[in-house]
Amino acid sequence: MAAGAAQDLHRWVARAVELTRLPAVGSEVYYFHQGHADQFSLPAPQADQPMLPCTVTSIFRFTAVEEPYARISLLPGNHSDQPAADTRPDPDSFHYYPKPLSQSDIQRSYLVVPNLCAQSMFPALEVRNNTQPLHMLDLNGEPYEFEHKAVPKHNLGGDWGKFVRLKGVGVGDSMVFIRGGDQSLMIESRPQQPLANLWLQEPLEELTVSSEFATLGVPFTVTYYPGRRSGSPFVVPRGAVDEAMCKQWESGMQVRMRPSDLVLRAGDTHGATLEDTTGTINAVTPSLVWRNIQIDLDGSSSSSPSATKNMWEVESVRAQPPVAKRTKTATDPGLSHDDQSKEPVKALRLMGFDIKAKEDIDTVEP
């Protein structure tokens, strides 16, 4: 595989993995209108609530050749009164192996698998046993039950015909096996040719409709492309946001960026580890709810000395106080003398949202 094609595939797999880390259907989230607009490099239409409490009603993931993406349907509405935990999965390592499909692969009732793929991706076969059942999921969680046979060649039977039929794969498409750190297996197809996405709206239309429907409190659907300009999911689990907004973020605080998942091609380890990026907060903008922390990165070059992050994308290197504090700032002139003290308070107000201390209740009220 040419270097350029290999890099494209690697990016594709990394973004596909990101789609598996989205909030679960039925979970409480916040929708950030500015982050949605940043993804398309467009100005955000006026929004009544830049941080909108919602519930996820459905998620459908698509594997376009250029980049995988998800359609996320949201129902605006107040969150429950119960505290919410941060449900984001811990960063993990993923290995993948691609296999281009031939005409015979599609026509047979089984898929011949290269030795390197079987040996590096599948569990080891038991002694004197040349077959094993393998359970795999696709990006949307559809299960496939395969039978792995090691003789005369490694091959997958069982639901291979079902996979070919449901995915509509063709000659030249790629089968991609992905193994998580917990040894769970995913299987997905990457089409060779672009597919028509007739159900997608133009970006500006999607932004406008989302803003209008959010204002009316009726369900709406957004398209999320991992790895685009924003680099940050704009549909975020409620617990992650609530916990971050109850912390006291100040200039001079040392922080660590939340690591991204590590994605490697099978057999290509080279001592790779999850990236640990640290820095120091340079400025905090309380009037914003999206990317309101500016961080000077440790060891950064002069060409990229800082990064602007969301509160839930970083963590303090040192322990945080259990409740939020109100301190005098140039951007908060309306506080009384008493409010400007450094004594802990039970709640703070940020962009029109009451953020309660965790000892009371871990929630955000519009």
Image: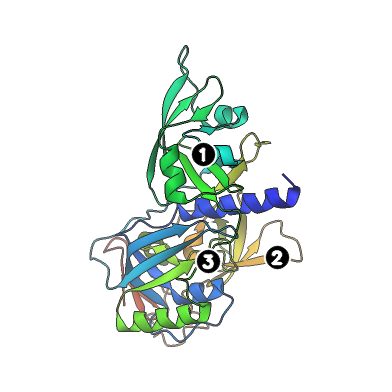
**Corner quadrant of residue 30:** bottom left
Nearer the viewer's eye, disc 3 or disc 2? 3
Report the label total: 3
Q: Mark 1: which secondary structure?
A: helix
Report the residue at 52% width, 76% height from top.
Answer: 37
Q: Nearer the viewer, residue 307 or 106?
A: 106
Residue 87, x across and y down, in percent: 37, 53
Please tell me which residue lies in front, 236 or 328.
236
Q: Residues within 10 Å of mark 2 (few under 14, many from 20)?
A: few
- x 45%, y 31%: residue: 157
Which circle's residue, 3 or 2, is located before the other in the chain?
A: 3
For mark 3, what is the residue? 196
Instruction: Tell me the residue that label 1 is attached to.
Output: 107
Identify the element where label 2 is drawn. loop
First along the sequence among labels 3 and 1: 1
* Depicted 144 relative to depicted 60: above or below: above
Q: Amino acid at mark 3?
A: Ala
User: Is the residue 135 above or below the residue 59 in the image?
Assistant: above
Cα separation between marks 1 and 2: 54 Å
Residue denoted by label 2: 305
Relative side of 354 to 234, left or right: left
Nearest to the eye among marks 3 and 1: give it: 1
Tag in front: 1 or 2: 1
Left or right of residue 326: residue 37: right
289 left or right, relative to 38: left
Residue shown at 53% from the left, 66% from the top: 196
Q: Earlier in the sequence, mark 1 or mark 2?
A: 1
Give the quarter of the figure containing the N terminus.
Answer: top right
Q: Is residue 317 among the parts visible in the rendering? A: no
Relative image position of residue 139 (x, y in whole percent): 45, 50
* Drawn side of residue 59 relative to residue 112, left or right: left
Extreme residue toward the top, this view: 128
